[in-house]
């Protein structure tokens, strides 16, 4: 059986609405006998033939299982920074709470114990990781788990503190709305 057939059969059997994003190592474990060059060629062909879509470096999407909930960027965070403490904050959390009326489309802001970075996910949008040295135990009362996104979410008060700590522009914040939450 060809490597492409093995890959496609595996995706058809194992991909679901909850598991539609895959890291390189997920596929590498499936085809350990391939050389690095043959493996890269296989993935390139899978993308060219529209079996897979490259989201960003090292992350691939199997569109046949992708849900239409618009949460791909959040799900990507959980995979790209699985080893770090991450939570939705800053403009994304404030916009979702109605405290900011305008926020860039297809751009999410995540506080992370990992290093700061901006990850372009092409047509899907951009993930902005902003480093934090806060410990989960110190802010756990200000976090709630968002099961749809698969990430922790900051309260309005914590998101405002994060905005100030990171010296973000606060011109779009509706301070009257903030006072309703705090």
Image (cartoon, rainbow, N blue to C red):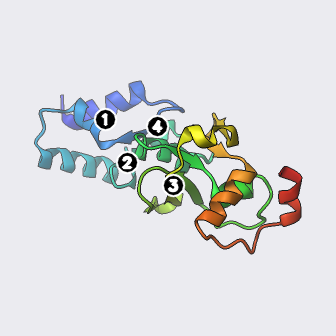
Q: Could you tell me which secondary element the residue under label 4 belongs to?
A: loop
Mark 4 vs mark 3: which is more N-terminal? Answer: 4
- Labelled pair 4, 1 in contact (Cβ < 8 Å): no
The correct choice, above or below, for 128 with respect to 63 in the image is below
Mark 2 vs mark 4: which is more N-terminal? Answer: 4
| Residue depth check, mark 4 versus mark 1: number of the one nearer the observer | 1
| Residue depth check, mark 3 versus mark 2: number of the one nearer the observer | 3
Residue 101 percent across, percent down from the top left: 78, 65
Left or right position of 88 against 3: right
Q: Could you tell me which secondary element the residue under label 3 belongs to?
A: loop
Residue 59, numbered circle: 2
Q: Which residue is mark 1?
A: 26
Q: Nearer the viewer, residue 11 or 168?
A: 168
Q: Which residue is mark 3?
A: 132
| Residue depth check, mark 4 versus mark 3: number of the one nearer the observer | 3
Q: Which residue is mark 4?
A: 20
Mark 3 vs mark 2: which is more N-terminal? Answer: 2
User: Real-space Cα distance between discs 2 and 4?
Assistant: 10 Å
């Amino acid at each position: 059986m060809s490597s492409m057939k093995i890959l496609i059969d595996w995706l058809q059997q194992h991909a679901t609405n909850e598991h539609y994003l895959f890291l390189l190592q997920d596929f590498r474990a499936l085809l350990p006998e391939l050389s690095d060059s043959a493996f890269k060629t296989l993935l390139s062909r899978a993308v060219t033939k529209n079996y897979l879509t490259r989201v960003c470096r090292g992350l691939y999407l199997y569109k046949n299982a992708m849900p239409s909930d618009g949460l791909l960027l959040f799900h990507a965070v959980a995979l790209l920074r699985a080893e770090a403490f991450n939570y939705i904050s800053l403009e994304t959390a404030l916009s979702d709470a109605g405290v900011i009326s305008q926020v860039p489309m297809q751009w999410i802001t995540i506080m992370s114990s990992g290093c700061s970075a901006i990850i372009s996910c092409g047509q899907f949008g951009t993930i902005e990781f902003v480093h934090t040295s806060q410990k989960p135990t110190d802010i756990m009362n200000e976090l709630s788990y968002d099961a749809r996104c698969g990430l922790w979410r900051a309260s309005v008060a914590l998101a405002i503190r994060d905005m100030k700590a990171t010296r973000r522009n606060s011109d779009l914040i509706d301070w009257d709305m903030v006072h309703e939450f705090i």
